[in-house]
Image (cartoon, rainbow, N blue to C red):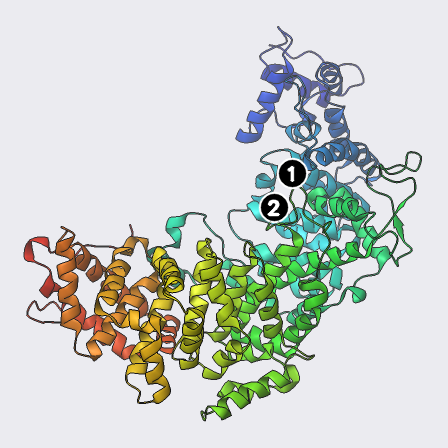
Amino acid sequence: MAAAPAAAGSGAGRGRRAAATVAAWGGWGGRPRPGNILLQLRQGQLTGRGLARAVQFTETFLTERDKQSKWSGIPQLLLKLYATSHLHSDFVECQNILKEISPLLSMEAMAFVTEERKLTQETTYPNTYIFDLFGGVDLLVEILMRPTISIRGQKLKISDEMSKDCLSILYNTCVCTEGVTKRLAEKNDFVIFLFTLMTSKKTFLQTATLIEDILGVKKEMIRLDEVPNLSSLVSNFDQQQLANFCRILAVTISEMDTGNDDKHTLLAKNAQQKKSLSLGPSAAEINQAALLSIPGFVERLCKLATRKVSESTGTASFLQELEEWYTWLDNALVLDALMRVANEESEHNQASIVFPPPGASEENGPPHSSTRTQLPQSMKIMHEIMYKLEVLYVLCVLLMGRQRNQVHRMIAEFKLIPGLNNLFDKLIWRKHSASALVLHGHNQNCDCSPDITLKIQFLRLLQSFSDHHENKYLLLNNQELNELSAISLKANIPEVEAVLNTDRSLVCDGKRGLLTRLLQVMKKEPAESSFRFWQARAVESFLRGTTSYADQMFLLKRGLLEHILYCIVDSECKSRDVLQSYFDLLGELMKFNVDAFKRFNKYINTDAKFQVFLKQVNSSLVDSNMLVRCVTLSLDRFESQVDVKVAEVLSECRLLAYISQVPTQMSFLFRLINIIHVQTLTQENVSCLNTSLVILMLARRKERLPLYLRLLQRMEHSKKYPGFLLNNFHNLLRFWQQHYLHKDKDSTCLENSSCISFSYWKETVSILLNPDRQSPSALVSYIEEPYMDIDRDFTEE
């Protein structure tokens, strides 16, 4: 079809665009329905061919279609925006157009995020969808990146206010229109460029929020060392900006999770580690190193984490941030929190600043009050809690990274632990009212509540900090360290070297250290509390490593063992996670400790109680096997000692008497081997394999290994499945060799926790895997030839 001549005054370019549009639709014959136009625009976006932008239409045509389709004039505004945003533009008119577009999208985003969006009619298209469909997102990206273009050696500049409007519109479009965030994430140069916009305080929060959303969907992790002048950028952040920046860092320093359970198997992890060795450090590791190279970075995080509420940013700047968050409804939390507590402390509020609730006008007033609502103290607390959440997470990840020892030294030097100890009662484990602040759409007991999330993040940090590290004694105060020394002196055993080496100027101050405070709240925790798991994990990490009698007695004197037994037996805990953490803690608390076994026997003082305890132990060996291992090891040590106190415990303790029976040990051994397979081994259940090995190693010491293997063979036959257990065990031990002989940390942990040299572990496994069928200690000697299946390839495809 021939193109119609251009209308007078419209210009040849506009005529050509109109002709191209007509050709794309196959002529003007019928009046195309809006749905057809939108469909072709979407296809153009996906294919990169055909219709993709408003500039491909005439303004007359867009205006005509807008009357029918109710596009709110957005395509026409985009057409004007394109015309006023060219390289030689002064951008004044461009900014005016952005001001017109922005409210059309922000109202829709607000409704979307606050879950008030109504279902649209089929003939109506949301503003953000139309904005994206007619090329608005790509155009704004081009406008924002104009400063990267040089003309005659000079780079173009756009105002912070204009950048702010562009960012606001982009974010609102990401919120409401599916796929936009992913498309932006694919523009790596744009993502890197966004970091440079954080140098301005005026655009910082909008930029940070958009980056966070983009990185959340980006397939490949961004590398911080590619960000221009990263060190200068971060160093120039004020404390408020640094806290918000931690939200972005949380995405960039954590290893990406595939979400596939199969990838959490040890087989898969080993394969991934081999691959990583050939590829070098991961992006997350590179990013961690980049951050740690920034002068003062960890010190500033420690100051943020330990800052008291009274030291936080002034009220005026806080209210300014609230206004920003009102626009950026990713933070609907703040608005909800403000509304929830607006009247909570109005009579006792010390602040004179007032803040109108969102949506309230001067004329109408807020919905629940005839005057402006005062800003309560609890809002300041929530402000600080949200910051500390992000900061503690970043510190926790760094503590678990490759530079762990470096981070440990800095965290100790900058007194993170005593600082958190001082905040424990007033902020971290504060008592909160029934109207405590919660996330939008959640309730106070939800694990997503900021109060609860802060507590869990705090406990995870303590766990990472204490785990197999001498700095764990910083969790105590001077008096408590003296108590450890006194325990060692009374028991006539050498003091723990790490206690003697602890820098007393870096420990907790006050009447109680952080560990003691944790024990106090742990014992008061309700039975159904979600904190029990994390509390037990944090305390257990303090005991991990080489067994310390003084550490155990310190905790025993504070009633920890009785509390654990109460939760397991008297409250009959049902949560598998909590039970596992309590069994692990109980095992570390009792291992090799005669006093602990005496206390156990004193609490479990009836057969009925003991049967309840055994029922919990036997209900899931994956959860309780670490306790079984510790009791088995303790029994072996006690039997070799000549001591009246030990002999008394051996004769009286129900638990030791139970474990000492060969049928009991064989029952545990059979089930431990039977519940795991090479293909299903994970970091959680591999302990079952190691516990089974402990039982057999101790049998080997007593020259009873052939007896135990013969009994396993009989148990197989009694189940009518000859060979199935021993073949499985053979495969498990082959994997054990591959896994542990190349992992120094794991082997050290095995040695320290069992007090059995790793060489004895290796020798025992080699003896069991001996291919000589004449060997009385080789597994193959007990597998009949027709049932032999020991050479199966268990490597992952």
- Mark 2–mark 1 Cα distance, whole angstroms, equals 9 Å
Task: Name the disc covering residue 463, or none.
Answer: none
Of 718 and 306, the residue lying toward us: 718
Query: How many residues crowd around disc 2 within 10 Å: few (fewer than 14), some, or many (20 or more)?
Result: many
Q: Quadrant of the N terminus?
A: top right
Residue 698 placement, left or right of 164 = left
Q: Are marks 2 and 1 in contact (CB under 8 Å)?
A: yes
Residue 630: image quadrant is bottom left
Q: Is residue 283 visible?
A: yes
Query: How many residues crowd around disc 1 within 10 Å: few (fewer than 14), some, or many (20 or more)?
Result: many
The percent coordinates of residue 349 (x first, y second) are 87, 56
For the point 9% across and 71% down, the residue is 775
Of 107 and 512, the residue lying toward us: 512
Three-letter amino acid code of the residue under disc 2: Ile
For the point 63% across and 11% down, the residue is 32
Residue 108: image quadrant is top right
Identify residue for label 1. 174
Question: Mark 2 or mark 1: which comes first in sequence?
Answer: 1
Three-letter amino acid code of the residue under disc 1: Cys
Identify residue for label 2. 214
Q: Secondary structure at mark 2?
A: helix
